[in-house]
Amino acid sequence: MSAWELMFLGPEGTHSHEAADCIASSLFAGQPVDQVAMQSFDDIFEAPRSAHRLACVPIENSIQGSVWQVWDALTREHLQEGARQILAAVTLPIHHYAMYRDGIDLDQVDEVVSHPQALAQCKEHIRRHFPGAREVAVSSTAEAARQIARGERARAVAIGSRRAAQSYGLSVSPEPFEDRPGNVTRFALVGSPDVAFAPPSWRLTDWTASLCLRGVPHRPGGLALALHTFAAANLNLTRLESRPVGDAIGNYVYYLDASVWPYADHGERVLAVVRELLMLQGVEILTLGVYPVYSPSA
């Protein structure tokens, strides 16, 4: 059997790398999986499509919300032949740590380097421990660790995972650095719809349909009527967010998640009815994935 190829936002040592490890060992247990670090989300979604090429990408954080680069990419995917979808999701706790080279004077730190999401999730800790330090955004938490380890920034600390600190030989703060202890991120496994994987021993928390509404009428009650269609179908919406189309102010698409847990067919029939009713309103619905959501915690 050919090995699976699992792409993640690199370099090695990112939280996406940890999530990829988790998915590879649990959803594809006993099967060969080659993990491939990619430099950006664009690189991940522009990689040639293959039945054995998958991606592990973050889609939502409990503090910072949705990862828009991924949702926009999934929407673009849907409009292409052989579109990939969300096949499963796993919610993982995220802990950030301050990382630094031995011998640095932490009272003289003038830069804090990390991915923009990590910087936002640690903003209060940064202000408290490194007042006046400039926040520097880079492509990933592991890239931040790499820059510090190589001495590219003389009086700087990085924010990232313990794994990144170990990979680059850095010291870490004794306690987590994120502002809120309940910080979790939902990571999605993205691939061809016909990919099959072994159900893990994790706790199944939901079955979710991630959808995108396009063409909602720009008139009073247009969005309300579209949403009422879901309520009439007894579908519980767990997420609703707007996103500009990009051609004019006031033109939006709407991303939403609906729980299809109660349905034996994972909402296939009820979503078909909703799709027909929305078409009568002039609204197009794109299905970005209907998938199980897991939590490795007990």
Image (cartoon, helix red, strand yellow):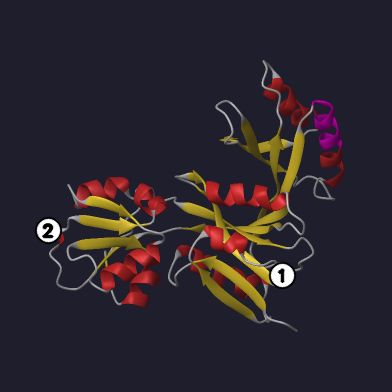
Q: Amino acid at mark 2?
A: Gln
Residue shown at the point (58%, 63%) measured from the top left:
44
Q: Which mark is residue 108?
A: 2
Q: Between residue 225 and residue 295, name the one nearer to us.
A: 225
Instruction: Classify the position of the C terminus by image quarter.
Output: bottom right
Q: Between residue 29 and residue 56, name the one nearer to us.
A: 56
Q: Which mark is residue 165?
A: none
- For label 2, count other residues whose C-alpha is less than 10 Å away and answer few (under 14), some (14-19) or many (20+): few
Q: Secondary structure at mark 2?
A: helix
* Residue with the mark numbered 1: 50
Q: Secondary structure at mark 1?
A: loop
Q: Main secondary structure of the magenta part?
A: helix
**Above or below, 14 relative to 218:** below
Q: Between residue 103 and residue 146, name the one nearer to us.
A: 146
Q: Residue 221 in the image: x percent, y percent?
A: 69, 17
Left or right? Give the position of 94 relative to 155: right
Instruction: From the image, state whether disc 1 or disc 2 is nearer to you.
Output: 1
